[in-house]
Image (tube, rainbow, N blue to C red):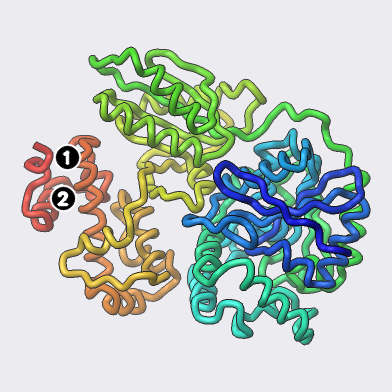
């Protein structure tokens, strides 16, 4: 089959490369996994054969996500939400009102999120080798540990696109086929540079779509090989249990690539599903990200408040669904739009000295009517907490903000829904640069671009307000011994783990004091100090000024 013409469309300001081929009446969008290059796909006979068969029953749409392949290179790599924007932009460019989504590996994760968010643009969902999380957790024990992911990072940095990358593990059936393995290495190299591949891999490590799986209501076919070592078959079974209309078909074999090994069996399952599925004509519910804002009682009422709220929500492509002098509620089709809008609103009202509290939740709601009992309860919860000048978000929202320039700190209270579900809450703010975090420690000599260091900082940042968090918990999260942690930090910065944790807590507290985000005792608690007098003593020792004097 001849390679289709490559075209471009805009996903907001980013150019996304796409191709269209096939003679079928049904539109099918292939969402690639980790890295792709739609031109190089056509240099692999096995992949060409697979795509050609799909083209006999569907109009097939291929594209490279932003930052990879033929699409624009970007400074920051795409969030799951931006990847959804790219899918929608490509569908719009080829006038595909609805489509079957075929997502491979990580592409399956974003496809599931798209199907939950835009069910009325999704005919059905097909996944191959999909995962819901990419790092070990007690409730998801099949994913790699932090230490295992670190080995992947190190391998990419040292051996990107070479024979040392162990690419044979992705297609064991092709391990002895030198032509195929040479193409696969070239495919990855042409899809991303070493630094880009590393960033994408780190971002994938943070993917967590577990809490939105029950919002996927479109007919779903999941395909996976039982011996896949990249994504365990137990992961597929876990996901199938949580998607209402999912069917998992397990194949013999170990290949993670769908276009190698027993491809005819895979194709037959896909063809039968595509041609026989009967989706709903209209879905009444979809996934919304909901922002609840509450103006804390203040004497400084501003008649321009409504205009400010309207402008910010419109700028971030949201919809205002409720407003009065005390409360507003808005919906967005993705968490990063909601979070960025909330940050802008918080800054705008802080300048006007109008206290504001914002909560962000994600919930499957009736299209056009998101104000449910749970949303109203969330609004009441925000009123009760009175978290002046803070943004709280639920863990589900946090998990979907992978790749954003935001930092999260665990909040002291849990939000319980009317249905009995409980959500951990986090405060959010713009991420403190790693260099700033380490240079805050007096006399620190920083080694840049160390992936281990990034994991340390991220772990500490997540637990800043947890007074029980210490070296033991840090070692457990990083899957290293205390001796290893001590040795590595000493090599990089000449400070101990305890000194680093304390320094980051105190710098976080200093920022809260300067922003007047609570009393000194409240700020001590938020920074992980249960004893305010001990906090003041440590603070003065580090900054040569007491917390109260700094506040004044």
Q: Position of residue 277 (x, y in %)?
A: 89, 43
Q: Position of residue 205 (x, y in %)?
A: 54, 61
Residue depicted at 54% across the width and 47% down the height: 400
Residue depicted at 39% across the width and 59% down the height: 458
Q: Position of residue 87 (x, y in %)?
A: 68, 46
Specify the label residue 520 is tagged with: 1
Give the mark nearer the N terminus: 2 vs 1. Answer: 1
Q: Residues within 10 Å of mark 1 (few under 14, many from 20)?
A: many
Please say whether residue 216 is visible from this viewpoint. no
Q: Are marks 2 and 1 in contact (CB under 8 Å)?
A: yes
Q: Position of residue 113 (x, y in %)?
A: 65, 45
Residue 169's place in the image compared with 357, above or below, is below
Residue toward you, 52 or 414: 52
Residue 142's place in the image compared with 413, above or below, is below
Q: Is residue 20 left or right of residue 417?
A: right
- What's the distance in space between the residues labelled 2 and 1, CA to CA? 9 Å
Q: Residues within 10 Å of mark 2 (few under 14, many from 20)?
A: many
Q: Is residue 422 left or right of residue 221?
A: left
Q: Is residue 441 left or right of residue 290?
A: left
Residue depicted at 58% across the width and 56% down the height: 72
Specify the label residue 112 is tagged with: none
- For disc 2, the marked residue is 535
């Amino acid at each position: 089959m001849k390679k289709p013409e490559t075209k471009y469309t805009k996903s907001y300001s980013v150019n996304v490369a796409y191709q269209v081929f096939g003679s079928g009446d049904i539109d099918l969008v292939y969402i690639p996994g980790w890295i792709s290059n739609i031109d190089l796909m056509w240099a692999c006979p096995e992949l060409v054969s697979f795509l050609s068969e799909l083209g006999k029953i569907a109009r097939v749409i291929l594209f490279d996500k932003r930052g990879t392949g033929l699409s624009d290179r970007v400074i920051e790599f795409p969030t799951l939400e931006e990847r959804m924007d790219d899918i929608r932009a490509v569908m719009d460019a080829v006038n595909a009102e609805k489509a079957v989504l075929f997502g491979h590996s990580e592409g399956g994760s974003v496809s599931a999120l798209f199907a939950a968010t835009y069910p009325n643009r999704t005919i059905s969902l097909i996944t191959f080798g999909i995962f819901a999380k990419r790092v070990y957790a007690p409730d998801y024990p099949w994913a790699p540990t932090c230490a295992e992911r670190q080995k992947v990072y190190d391998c990419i940095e040292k051996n990107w696109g070479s024979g040392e990358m162990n690419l044979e593990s992705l297609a064991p059936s092709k391990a002895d086929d030198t032509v195929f393995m040479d193409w696969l290495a070239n495919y990855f190299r042409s899809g991303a540079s070493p630094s880009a591949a590393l960033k994408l891999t780190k971002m994938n490590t943070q993917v967590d779509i577990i809490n939105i799986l029950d919002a996927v209501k479109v007919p779903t076919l999941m395909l996976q090989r039982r011996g896949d070592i990249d994504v365990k078959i137990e992961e597929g079974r876990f996901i199938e249990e949580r998607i209402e209309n999912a069917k998992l078909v397990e194949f013999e074999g170990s290949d993670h690539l769908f276009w190698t090994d027993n491809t005819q069996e895979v194709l037959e399952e896909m063809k039968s599903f595509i041609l026989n599925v009967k989706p709903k004509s209209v879905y009444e519910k979809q996934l919304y990200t909901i922002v609840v804002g509450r103006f804390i009682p203040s004497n400084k009422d501003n008649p321009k408040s409504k205009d400010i709220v309207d402008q910010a929500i419109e700028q971030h492509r949201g919809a205002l669904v409720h407003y009065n002098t005390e409360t507003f509620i808005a919906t967005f089709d993705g968490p990063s739009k909601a979070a960025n809008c909330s940050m802008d609103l918080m800054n705008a009202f802080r300048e006007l000295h109008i206290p504001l509290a914002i909560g962000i939740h994600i919930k499957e709601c009736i299209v056009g009517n998101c104000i449910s009992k749970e949303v109203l309860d969330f609004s009441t919860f925000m009123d009760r907490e009175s978290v002046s000048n803070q943004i709280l978000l639920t863990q589900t929202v946090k998990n979907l903000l992978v790749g954003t320039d935001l930092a999260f700190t665990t909040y002291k209270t849990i939000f319980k829904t009317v249905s009995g579900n409980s959500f951990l809450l986090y405060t959010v703010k713009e991420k403190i640069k790693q260099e700033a975090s380490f240079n805050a420690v007096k006399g620190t000599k920083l080694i840049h671009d160390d992936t281990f260091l990034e994991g340390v900082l991220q772990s500490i940042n997540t637990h800043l307000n947890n007074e029980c968090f210490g070296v033991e918990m840090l070692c457990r999260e990083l899957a290293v011994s205390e001796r290893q942690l001590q040795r590595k930090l000493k090599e990089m910065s000449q400070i101990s783990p305890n000194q680093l944790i304390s320094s980051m807590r105190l710098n976080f507290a200093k920022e809260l004091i300067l922003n007047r985000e609570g009393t000194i005792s409240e700020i001590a608690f938020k920074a992980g100090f249960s004893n305010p007098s001990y906090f003041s003593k440590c603070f003065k020792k580090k900054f040569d000024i007491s917390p109260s004097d700094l506040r004044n």
